[in-house]
Structure formats: structure tokens, C-alpha cells
Image: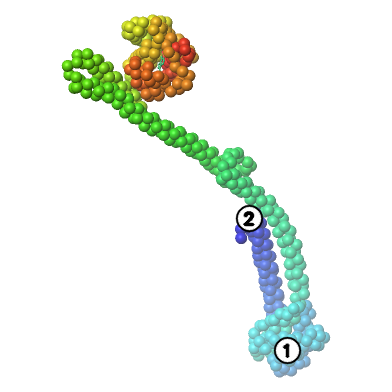
């Protein structure tokens, strides 16, 4: 059975008080009794001495008379006198145990004293009944013991005194008990209430309710305990929050890993497929050459196509290796301040030659701006974007390049008047091997790795890339890097 701390403390308090008051009363009453005993023992011993002196004096005056005769004649008188002196009933016995004198009218007390035989043998003895104490003492003379004196000491006063004290103890004890209990109850109850408040706080923590508010108005170990609980409370909440956060991060990482794994599988599948096509073409030309060794036209055609497919293979290997290495390893880029106007002008000059071949016109509107990036990577980024702007353009088309600073970023916009990218492909064109129109890409020997590589390189330079698609009016790509002031 479970007993609450409140009941236990109340029971304990009541028990302790009862024990204390009870023990105290018993001790004091015991001491009072002892004191009374000491008092009447010394009084009676004193009186027995007086009786001895008194009887001895009388006996000396009647020397020559035999002791029994002496007692017979003087006994009543002696008992009366000793009775007056001691203010008690006194009975005188001879050595045979027969009464020879009584200070009260004869036989007014029928003594049942059993101590007489002891006193007859020269010993002091007494016994107590409900109301009286019978004290017997030998009377010794120069002739030896001649009689026994019995004092009958009334105990009424002592008993009444004891009763009074017991009553006082009952009243005062009850009062002390009640008052102490009330004070103790108030005190213990305040402690118990605070302990129960702390327990409630802990119960709330158990079910995940964190409140961290201190409510106890005290300045002792319980306050320390509450502070400790509040401290633990906030630590537990913090830890749970951190754990939740870590769990979220872990979930996110697992999701990302799954996506990466899928991407990797797709990448390997694509790469195998993409490698096969040029290799099959090369293989076919090699077979044809072996069959028709003396066909100059075939030879010429084979040379051209094998060279084209080999270039494509090399380009693909180079881009695929670059992309997978960027995804796998954390490269330390050689970040340096780059003046974007100068860099883009240089690229435009190089690309312009190719653009002219395709009857395209380039318009550059550039402003000075600095970014912190890897020179080689930035070159690759813009060469790839501009390469697309040429490849997927229309005859007599145009390419516009301009830059500006917006919100602490250097933005570079490349727009072309080419075939454009349909809205449904907007999110896919940065995926490896994705091509909008495979046939068109084949003609332009595109393998679909350029923009995937560009996106990776841009992100590694803390930049962003987005496709601002204006369908049928060509393609616009915006690249942003943090502006270096
Ligand atoms: P690679 O660049 O690897 O030689 P690619 O040019 O085909 O091959 P990406 O540069 O990644 O590959 O481009 C992906 C696809 O996006 C292209 O195949 C093309 O369909 C489309 N695309 C990219 N840029 C343009 C553009 N300026 N205009 C129209 N379509 C574009
Ligand atoms: Mg490309």
C-alpha cells in the first residue's frame, strides 16, 4: 500500500509529539514519586529516631523493671506521646508481636501489617497499601531490642498531590500537543506542498511539457532543488530540440543520399548509352572501310565522321569526368578577385569568331564589377552558356550579354534569339544528359552535360543560375555572384 508523504508526515508528527509529551510526563511523575518516597522515608526514619530516644529515656527512668512489664505499664502512654510528637498514628508492639500501646483509641485501625516480624528481628521495614504506609522500626535499648514501633503514615496528601500533577500534565500536555501539532502541521505542510509542486513539475517534464518557471518562495535546499530541476528542464528541452533537429538533418541527408544514388544510377545508365552511339558509328565506318578499301568517297566520309565522333567521345569523357569529380570531391578553388567586364569581353572576343560562322551577331553591354571566384571555372561557365546560345540559335540570330549589380550581387544576363526552351523543360535542363530535342542536339553534337557542369561550378563559387524563359523569343539565362566591394 502506498502512503502519501503528507499522511506520513502527519502521522509521524502526531506520533513524535505523543511520544515526547508521554515520555516527559512519565519522567516527571516518576521523579515526583521518587521525591515523595525520599521525603517520607527520611521523615519516618527521623521519627523512629525520636521514638527510640523517647522510649530509651523512659526505660532508663524505670530501670530494674523487666522490659515486658515496662511496656505493659508504660506502652499506651508512650504510644500516645510518640503519636503527638510525630503527628501520626503510632502502635507499640512487644517482642512477641502483641500490641502494647496505640496513639489512637485502641483498635481504631486494624493493622494488617506484615512488617512486624521483620522489625522484631531488629530490621526496619515498611509496606504500602492504597491509603497508608505502615512503617515498623525496632526500639533498641542497652538491654537490646525491647519493642517495635509502627508508624501509620497517611498517603492521602501525596496521592492527591500526584493526582493534581497528573491532571496538570493531562491539560498542559494536551495543550502542548495540540499547539505543537498545529505549528508542526503548518511547517511540514508547507514543505510537503512544495515537494508536491516539484513532483508535479517533474511529471510535466515526463510528458514533455517544459515550463522552466520557478514558483517556490523559499531560500533553502528545496529552492536549490527547484533551480536544479529548472536547469535540467531547459537542458532536456534543448537536447530534445537538438535531437529533433539532428533527426531532421539526418532524414534530409538520407533523402539526399537516395536522390544522389538515383542520380548516379541514371548518370551511369546515360553514360553507357551515350558512349555506345559514337562507338557504334565508328565501328560501322571501320567495318565499311574494311569491306570497301578502294572507295575514296567512303574513306573521306569515314575520316570525317570518325573524327567527329571521336571528338564527341573525348568531349563527353572530359565533361563526365569533370562533373563526377566535382560531385564526389570537395575541390579547393583558387578564389581570386575577378573583374567581370574584362573577363567577359575576352570570352566574347573568342566566341565571336564562332558566332560569325553561324551568321550571328553578339551585343555586349558590360560594366565594371568584381567577384571573388576561380578564374578557370568562371571561364568554363560562360563559354558553355555562350556555346549553347550559338548552338541553339536561328540563322541571323543575336546574342546579348549585359551585367549589372543588384542587391549586393553581380548579375550577368545572356539572352539569345534562338529556338528557346519549353516551359516544361525549365527545371530539367540542368540535369546531366538532358536535352530538349535529342535530334537537334545530335546535329549540334550536344551531349547534355554542359549546363549540369555549369550549375555545379556556379554553386561552388557561391553563385546562382536561373533560366528566364521567354518562349519563342529565345532563351535568357541569368548568373549571379556575390559582389566583391
Ligand atoms: P553539351 O553542352 O554537353 O555539349 P548540350 O548543349 O546539349 O550538350 P546542355 O548545355 O547541358 O547540353 O544543355 C541541355 C539542353 O538544354 C540542350 O540539349 C538544349 O536542348 C537545351 N538548351 C540549352 N541552352 C539552350 C539555348 N540557349 N537555347 C535553346 N535550348 C537550349
Ligand atoms: Mg551545351
Q: Most extreme residue toward the right, as rendered?
A: 105
Q: Colour scheme of this structure image?
A: rainbow
Q: List x then y, in percent, for residue 445.
A: 33, 17
Q: Nearer the viewer, residue 408 or 232?
A: 408
Image quadrant in which the N terminus is located: bottom right
Residue 314 left/right relative to 223: left
Residue 58 left/right relative to 213: right
Q: Nearer the viewer, residue 27 or 219?
A: 219
Residue at 56%, 42% (x, y): give it: 208
Q: List x then y, in percent, for residue 343.
A: 35, 10
Q: Nearer the viewer, residue 152 or 172?
A: 172
Q: List x then y, in percent, for residue 29.
A: 69, 68
Residue at 48%, 14% (x, y): give it: 471
In the rendered view, tell whether residue 204 sits above or below residue 111.
above
Mark 2 surroundings within 10 Å by alpha-carbon count, few (fewer than 14), some (14 through 19), many (20 or more): few
Dot 1 or dot 2, earlier in sequence: 2
- Secondary structure of the residue carrying tag 2 is loop
Location of ligand 1 given as a quarter of the image = top left
Q: Quadrant of residue 20?
A: bottom right
| Residue matched to label 2 | 4
Indicate which disc residue 93 carries. 1
In the rendered view, tell whether residue 108 sits above or below residue 319.
below
Q: Quadrant of residue 123?
A: bottom right
Q: How many labels sit on residues?
A: 2
Image quadrant in which the C terminus is located: top left
Q: Nearer the viewer, residue 484 or 126?
A: 484
Does residue 326 appear anywhere in the picture?
Answer: yes
Amino acid at each position: 500500500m502506498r502512503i502519501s508523504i503528507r499522511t506520513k508526515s502527519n502521522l509521524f508528527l502526531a506520533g513524535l509529539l505523543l511520544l515526547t509529551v508521554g515520555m516527559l510526563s512519565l519522567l516527571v511523575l516518576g521523579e515526583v514519586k521518587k521525591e515523595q518516597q525520599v521525603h517520607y522515608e527520611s521523615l519516618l526514619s527521623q521519627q523512629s529516631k525520636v521514638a527510640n530516644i523517647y522510649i530509651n529515656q523512659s526505660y532508663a527512668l524505670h530501670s530494674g523493671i523487666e522490659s515486658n512489664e515496662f511496656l505493659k505499664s508504660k506502652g499506651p502512654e508512650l504510644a500516645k506521646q510518640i503519636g503527638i510528637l510525630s503527628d501520626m498514628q503510632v502502635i507499640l508492639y512487644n517482642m512477641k508481636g502483641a500490641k502494647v500501646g496505640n496513639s489512637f483509641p485502641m483498635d481504631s485501625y486494624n493493622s494488617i501489617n506484615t512488617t512486624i516480624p521483620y522489625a522484631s528481628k531488629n530490621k526496619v521495614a515498611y509496606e504500602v497499601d492504597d491509603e497508608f504506609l505502615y512503617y515498623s522500626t525496632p526500639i533498641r535499648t542497652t538491654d537490646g531490642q525491647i519493642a517495635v514501633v509502627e508508624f501509620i503514615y497517611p498517603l492521602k496528601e501525596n496521592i492527591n498531590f500526584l493526582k493534581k500533577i497528573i491532571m496538570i500534565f493531562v491539560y498542559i500536555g494536551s495543550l502542548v500537543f495540540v499547539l505543537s501539532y498545529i505549528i508542526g502541521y503548518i511547517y511540514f505542510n508547507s514543505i510537503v506542498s512544495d515537494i508536491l509542486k516539484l513532483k508535479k513539475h517533474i511529471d510535466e517534464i515526463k510528458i514533455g511539457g517544459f515550463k522552466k518557471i520557478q514558483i517556490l518562495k523559499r531560500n533553502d535546499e528545496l529552492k536549490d532543488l527547484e533551480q536544479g530541476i529548472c536547469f535540467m528542464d531547459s537542458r532536456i528541452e534543448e537536447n530534445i530540440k537538438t535531437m529533433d533537429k539532428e533527426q531532421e538533418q539526418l532524414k534530409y541527408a538520407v533523402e539526399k543520399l537516395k536522390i544522389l544514388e538515383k542520380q548516379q544510377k541514371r548518370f551511369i545508365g546515360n553514360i553507357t548509352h551515350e558512349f555506345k552511339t559514337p562507338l557504334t558509328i565508328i565501328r560501322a565506318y571501320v567495318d565499311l572501310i574494311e569491306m570497301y578499301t578502294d572507295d575514296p568517297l567512303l574513306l573521306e566520309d569515314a575520316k570525317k565522321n570518325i573524327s567527329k565522333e571521336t571528338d564527341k567521345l573525348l568531349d563527353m569523357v572530359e565533361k563526365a569526368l569533370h562533373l563526377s569529380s566535382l560531385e564526389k570531391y570537395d575541390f579547393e578553388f583558387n578564389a581570386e578577385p575577378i573583374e567581370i567586364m574584362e573577363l567577359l569581353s575576352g570570352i566574347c572576343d573568342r566566341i565571336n569568331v564562332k558566332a560569325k560562322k553561324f551568321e550571328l551577331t553578339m551585343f555586349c553591354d558590360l560594366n565594371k564589377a568584381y567577384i571573388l571566384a576561380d578564374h578557370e571555372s568562371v571561364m568554363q561557365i560562360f563559354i558553355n552558356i555562350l556555346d549553347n546560345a550559338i548552338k541553339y540559335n536561328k540563322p541571323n540570330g543575336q546574342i546579348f550579354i549585359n551585367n549589372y549589380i543588384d542587391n549586393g550581387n553581380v548579375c550577368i544576363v545572356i539572352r539569345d534569339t534562338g529556338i528557346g526552351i519549353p516551359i516544361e523543360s525549365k527545371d530539367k535542363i540542368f540535369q546531366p544528359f538532358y536535352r530538349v530535342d535529342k535530334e537537334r542536339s545530335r546535329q549540334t553534337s550536344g551531349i547534355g552535360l554542359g549546363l549540369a557542369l555549369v550549375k555545379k561550378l556556379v554553386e561552388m563559387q557561391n553563385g546562382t543560375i536561373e533560366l528566364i524563359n521567354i518562349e519563342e523569343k529565345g532563351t535568357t539565362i541569368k548568373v549571379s555572384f556575390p559582389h566583391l566591394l
